[in-house]
Amino acid sequence: MAEIKKIQRILVSLFLLLFLTIVLPVPGIPAPAKKPVSAMEFPLTGKEWMAKSGMDWGSKYYPAKPVRGGIANFAAPLYIGLMNPHHWPVNDWVTIGALYDKLIVTDGKYRPTVPMLAESWKYLDEKTVVMKLRQGVQFHDGSPFNAEGLKYQIDWILDPKNGAWDRAWMEPLASIEVMDNYTVKWHFKKPWAGFLGVMSNVPGYVISAKALKADVALKEMKQLAQQVEREKKNVDQAEKEAAAASGDAAEKAKAKLEAARKKLASLEEGYKKTAALAEGAKELDNNPVGTGPYIFEEGNPGNYLKLKRNPNWWFAKFIGTDMPYYDGIKTSVIPDPSVRLANLRAGKIDNLVLDPSQIPMFKNERQLQVFTNNINWVNALRFNHKDGPCRDIRVRKAISHAIDRKALIRGVDFGLGRIASCMYPEDHWCHNPALKPVSYDPELSKKLLAQAGYKNGLTIKGYMSNLTQAISSAEAIKAMLAKVGITWNIEFLDPAASSARMRKVDYDLAAGGWAWIYDPDLMPTGLYHPDGGFNFGRSNNKKAIELIEAGRTEVDFDKRTKIYWELEKVLYDNYEDAWLWWPRYVSVTRKNVQGLNQAMGNQFKEAFGVSHPTWFKDGKENRF
């Protein structure tokens, strides 16, 4: 998620795919009550699940009955990236949601109350939760979902050597204990208010333990192979030295040779054992194995990704339907928005999230359905507080006040955005209503720059995504900064290059923000906590860190809300970042696609998205 911020428009262009296929991640999750109680303390049948959710699968939902068949075609500006959701970069969370199921999903009020792979959960106290897992669930590789496998995944996330970017979110977890084959007990180091919210986010995407173990073995095998080759060279060198030595030196050389041979033998034995475990293994980053409605079929980076229908999707059996309805999904990589639009008009793709400039073209389209909605993201710019001129709050203030947010929204986003005051959107329960967006005041910016010692101007460096929308935004902001004497040297990079620059903190001002704002702890931890997956030392606001840690542990809902209000104010007052706008999206879908119910989707949000996939009329693409 945080470098997601660098590719905001990538995710915009993929959002409705989520709605059209399976997953519809939506914002904000309230904390548990003062004395945490479970939303689910006993298992539900499929009928009970439907009744409790309040959703409908009949005529109230859609007048036509679902029909099986056809390949759904979508387009994206970038390839998915890595397909292990715990590794970065992931460019397409829509497809991640098609491949993997989560333990919990959020309801229409943005709370983590809907049981998926977690069948039920119960707080024994503020630091202990017992969770029952759903039985009879199989991964795409045929292995079973169970408690041992879940424990392995959680322990894998917690191990720093595995590079899970979401590890910092799991800091309050002391351990996960297997009670029986389908029951785990979670032990927290301290009260953890955001536990259910975290489990309804990336850490809750469940991976096949069989595939994950093989992936680990494959990486270890490659590392051991390199060590074996190095040690063979050491042995060769030691043999030469032993052959050339004489007298006392000969004994030392002989001992050195013997030690090298023993080390080589140990490494070769370790390699042999690891190779046996890795036999037939494939890297999960490129060969995902989940329990979701679609199975990875084929990927060609830069060109396309193909998924095929999972005929054994547990949720379909649980509810008693024949979901998913499509035989497969193909996502073609088409960077140019005008080319994506041409493909939609030609009937070659079934859905498109529009570039704002394209919206007027669709007012009178009879073959297309148009949807407009708010989305729980924040577009922002990221400051480097560690090095360079942006260490000075006067420079950060000057930059922020030099940006005309209203003009940006009008010119770049065609009026779709809502001006942002800080992190949480205005409809998120942790939004601080007392904060007002930073004013556009170029004269103040000039004064602040002069006070900071840059009366004759300032040059800063940074980067943005190389997507069309990001380039347009960056060029507009660059022009605004130039008016107050700031030269912003921007590089437009792909996600991998952006991630490298972020890790090195090699920028003054760069793309920022956050997509999918769920539990309020996730974004500030990722961006502003020292252990956050997207900080890398660029921000070290002591008061903010204290509040982040306090927010994790406060289980009283009202008190937790006030903590995040205060956190927003601390970040706002320090100009920690330049928050720009909370976006909206407009998508178009061919009328041959059925099962879209915008009202029900808005009402039930993610719970609706995972349970109501779309289909083709007559089960055929009917491309025109």
Image (cartoon, rainbow, N blue to C red):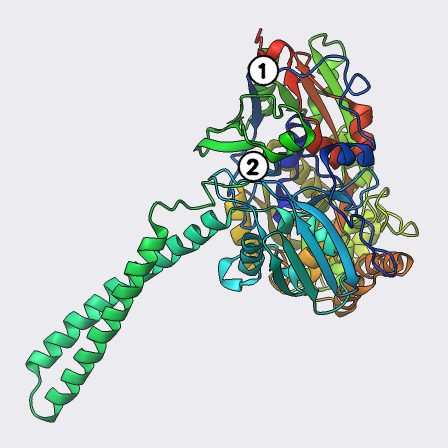
Marks 1 and 2, how far apart in space? 28 Å
Q: Number of callouts in the render?
A: 2
Q: Residues within 10 Å of mark 1 (few under 14, many from 20)?
A: few
- Say if residue 111 shows up in the picture: yes
Rendered image quadrant of residue 545:
bottom right
In the rendered image, the quadrant that contains the C terminus is top right
Q: Amino acid at mark 1?
A: Ala
Q: Quadrant of residue 173?
A: bottom right
Disc 2, SS: helix
Q: Residue at x 62, y 25 (%)?
A: 323
Which label sits on residue 409?
A: none
Give the residue displayed 57% in from the left and 29% down from the top: 76
> At 86% from the left edge and 61% from the top edge, which residue is drawn?
35
**Quadrant hosting residue 33:** bottom right
Label 1: which secondary element: helix
Q: Earlier in the sequence, mark 1 or mark 2?
A: 2
Q: Residue 185: image x %, image y %?
A: 67, 60
| Camera-nearest residue between 324 and 457 | 324
Question: Residue 330 placed where, x, y %?
Answer: 52, 25
Q: Amino acid at mark 2?
A: Leu
Q: Is residue 242 above or below residue 495?
A: below
Q: Is residue 427 left or right of residue 462?
A: right
Above or below 404: residue 616: above
* Residue situated in front as seen by the camera: 231 or 269: 269
Q: Is 144 placed left or right of 197 in the picture?
A: left
Which residue is the site of mark 1? 342
* Residue, disc 2: 99
Evaluate if marks 1 and 2 touch, with contact meaning CB atoms under 8 Å apart.
no
Where does residue 291 sit, x and y in percent of width and height? 56, 39
Q: Callout 2: few (<14), some (14-19), or many (20+) C-alpha neighbours within 10 Å?
A: many
From the top left corner, tell me how far across and down residue 534 is, in percent. 62, 56
